Image (tube, rainbow, N blue to C red):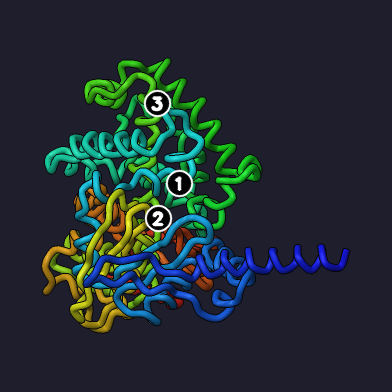
Amino acid sequence: MRIATATALTASGLAVGRLWAGYRRQHDAPTGYHAPPLYLEGLDSVPLVGYVSRILDFVVRPVAMIDRALRRHGEVVSIRVPGRYDFIFLNSAKAYSTVLSLPAEHGSAGPILGLVPTVGLWFPRRSHDHDTLESLVLAGKKILAGLLTPDRAAQVTAMIGPVLDTHQQEWPVVADLSERLVPAVYEIAGRFFAGDAFWDRFGEELVPLLRTIADGIDVPRATVATTPLHRMLPEYRANGELVRVIDRCIREMPDSPLVETIREAGTDERDVRWMLMYILWNAVTYPGSYTLWTLVDILSDPRVHHSVHNSPDRGEYLGWCLWETIRLNPVSTLARWLKKPLTYTASDGTHYYLAADNVVGVFPAMLNKDPDRWPEPELYRPERFGDSPSPRTSLFGTGPFGCIAGEFSRLLISGVCDHLLTQNSLELVGPVPERRCRVHLTYPSGPVFVRVTAAQNDHIVGTGPACHR
């Protein structure tokens, strides 16, 4: 018995040893190339414990982990996902362009988007494979681009005042912007894309569902979303209700201009409801988040608030404020699944070989705070864009999966801020809650209270507390 037990323990130990050795082993690279260095530090480097530590990092503190890895290894680092693949990060302006410019047949977004609740998971479509999802996303971007021509995008400006004025009639003197402002922005964007008749009929139902789904897009919740526990998530329940509402939209308003546009684009009938969801999801969630934080950033800085009211071109200056808010609060990662190997030459001349069937990504938070690109990068200074070329690539991405709504977002968000700051005196009340860094969005971890009174003059200076970053 003792011999059998000892043999079993020895075999188990050898198996664990082989497993751990494989976990720490770098990928093979052709002659003249190097495999990206693996990030293994602290508990991550302890056998068995390292698996648990790494999984916890991915679930609880992914942004901090990526930041540590890049600071430790510099321009190229590989973070191994236990039992799955390597997440290889490249950190430079050249890398940003390289990764985001990869054609879809080389750097795919399908497997990445497939992990996003609602868009990739849960919402019904004719096929749930990654290639079909990617094709739908690319088709959706073309539809969005057709709805965002310069002439049409400019029409959003006239929609801002009427919607905001209606919403503000119900605002209390001290209002929570996360509960009051965000739905107003959702409505403006929703009416722009779907039309007044559609929004009058379904908007009141769509807003809380879309907000609940957007509020659930973070790494821990996305991880739970892939397990049987996903049924406990409020965003899963909102997804089910959203399916039912959108089915009603199509059934009751088949001649809606947006539904007709989706069909005219050649969308398979089985994917019409997915495409309608995708367009509405893109239309409202990003503007909702960035409008809130742009306004908070303005109110948090008396100098910036004063500059808004005294700028000779308020629209332009508010656009700079939006860009500065995005710069300091970007999406956490931009990633692609490698369908074939990628070679990359670092700034020191080292040639790296990135094997297929792994993920390559960039980390905008570090690039956007690089002092060589952005002087005094930690400061909120919108004026920096007055002397800089268009930030289109660095803030909105590029390539087949880049954001195509940059100008629309500028018009919408600067217009909302302009209207609110012109019609009201706004003052932050109490500390601003910490910003939760998410996969795609940054939403507040609590209420954002602001005191709203009628404007007394055109030169209102903010006196609210500084925003926590």
Residue hosting label 2: 440
Amino acid at the residue labelled 1: Val
Q: What residue is drawn where x is 61% and y is 45%? A: 227
Disc 1 packing (10 Å; few <14; some 14–19; many ≥20)? many
- The picture places residue 210, in percent across and down from the top left corner, at 46, 41
Amino acid at the residue labelled 3: Arg
Picture quarter containing residue 371?
bottom left
**Labels 1, 3: front one:** 1
User: Do labels 1 and 2 touch, CB within 8 Å?
Assistant: yes
* Mark with earlier residue (2, 3): 3
- The picture places residue 429, in percent across and down from the top left corner, at 50, 69
- The picture places residue 69, in percent across and down from the top left corner, at 42, 76
Q: Is residue 438 above or below residue 285?
A: below
Q: SS of the residue at dot 2?
A: loop
* Mark with earlier residue (1, 2): 1
Q: Which mark is residue 273?
A: 3
Amino acid at the residue labelled 2: His
Q: Give the Cα separation between the discs numbered 1 and 3.
A: 17 Å
**134 vs 144, nearest the viewer:** 134
Q: Give the Cα separation between the discs numbered 1 and 2.
A: 10 Å
Q: Which mark is residue 116?
A: 1
Q: What residue is drawn where x is 34% and y is 67%? A: 89
Residue 462 in view, yes or no: yes
Name the quarter where the N terminus is drawn: bottom right
Q: SS of the residue at dot 3?
A: helix
Picture quarter containing residue 325?
bottom left
Q: Give the Cα separation between the discs numbered 2 and 3.
A: 23 Å
* Mark with earlier residue (1, 3): 1
**257 vs 162, nearest the viewer:** 257
Asked whether, in this view, residue 45 is left or right of residue 133, the answer is right
Disc 3 packing (10 Å; few <14; some 14–19; many ≥20)? many
